[in-house]
Image (cartoon, rainbow, N blue to C red):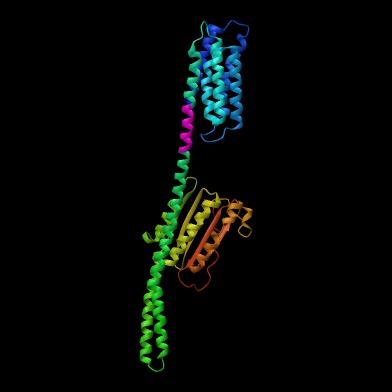
Amino acid sequence: MATTVDVAFLLLLGSSFARFLNRDQGGSGTGWVVALFAGFGLLYVLGRFLAPAPRPGSAPTTRHLVWLGSVTAVWVALLVLAPSATWCAMPLLFAGLHALPPRLALPLAGVLTVLVVVSEIRVADGALNPNMVVAPPAVAAVATAVLVHLQRQGTRQRVLIEDLVRTRHDLAATERRAGVLAERQRLATEIHDTVAQGLSSQRMLLQAAERVWRTDPDTAHAHLRDAAEITSRGLAEARRFVHDLAPADLAEHALPGALAVLAERDSAPGLAVEFRLDGDPGRLPERVEAALLRIAQGALANVREHAAATRAAVTLTCLDDQISLDIADNGRGFEVDGPRASSAPETDRERGHGLPAMRIRARQAGGTLTVESAPGEGTVVSVAVPLAPLASAPPSAPRKEPVL
């Protein structure tokens, strides 16, 4: 639309100038008219770059209104000196109708139309041609009606699109809430039908055993055996729940494969994540694998959100008596012993709960977590989980270089 209007303006400006040179020049103001033609065209073109029209549905900017008033004023002055510029009013009409609200665009269209009619009558030769009076208002009325209709259609379409986007977001939120509620209901049903029922049966058997403990020891022992059997079944069900709630990647891969998938998934433009494996971890307890994977996920999330790093490395080292996981990045780092405020923006500090959660996971898995960092030198998060009791504490390891 804008390109068509601009091309039409340039064509009409060129034809008006050519008509002026052929018919109207020769007077004392020819130089001024030529200068006005040049200034009119230059002002129109510069305005398209320096004062662009507002987006549909948006209010015009002050700069655009100043440009529209300036270019209209220059056109009126040009029209007084050279009536050949009459039809340059059409692009101005479209520009005004496109940018201004109807309460301002319609009066502007009326003023431009009156000026065109007056200019046509002024240069008419002989008897007055009725088309000079009828044609400009008719053309302006049609153009105004079309543009106003298009504006209203565009407004309705924008409202419909906004409603559609809002409805889609509401539907997605509703589906998420429904999924959460359904999963809670499923877990509640599973726990009620297995663990809760088992605990209720154990309580009844233990109470029955207590009542006949002295009078009928054999029956009491039978109740205890039944309670122990129910306990075994309840423990198996609880382990099944834990297994079902474990990280999904561990259901398809061992820990090294899950870490490799995580590194590949977290790699993105601007951040390259590499996975390295040193040794063979063998078969690890499920709680250890889940804890290490969750710690790696949390550390890489911190790298993405806080470190401003370009490279990161996830290293899994397997020894005879322990397994260790290191996540190193070449980001901005921070003071480990000082407040996070020394190196992180305010929004990052307010959300920075990842390290305490990782320490808790490491402690629950029987290991320890350490963080080594300094401003401008990157960060290394290390977690070590012993696989067997050690005779003595291991020597402290040298600081790992986070520079990748």
Q: Residue at x 40, y 73 (%)?
A: 195
Residue 372: percent from left, percent from top? 57, 58
Residue 377: percent from left, percent from top? 58, 52
Relative to 126, say whether 48 is above or below.
below
Residue 373: percent from left, percent from top? 58, 56
Lateral position of residue 80 relative to residue 147, left or right:
right
Extreme bottom residue here?
Answer: 215
Relative to 224, say whether 266 is above or below.
above
Which corner quadrant of the image does residue 258 belong to?
Answer: bottom left
Judge whether residue 64 can be spotted in this image.
yes
Observer-nearest of 337 and 41 = 41
Relative to 99, say whether 82 is above or below.
above
Observer-nearest of 370 and 303 = 303
Judge whether residue 280 can be spotted in this image.
no
Numbered disc total:
0
Q: Main secondary structure of the magenta part?
A: helix
Lateral position of residue 265 relative to residue 372, left or right:
left
Relative to 27, say whether 115 is above or below.
below
Q: Is residue 147 magenta?
A: yes
Q: Residue at x 51, y 48 (%)?
A: 310
Q: Residue at x 46, y 31 (%)?
A: 150
Residue 119: percent from left, percent from top? 56, 13
Observer-nearest of 211 and 324 = 211
Start-end of magenta stretch: 145-156
Q: Is residue 96 magenta?
A: no
Which corner quadrant of the image does residue 65 belong to?
Answer: top right
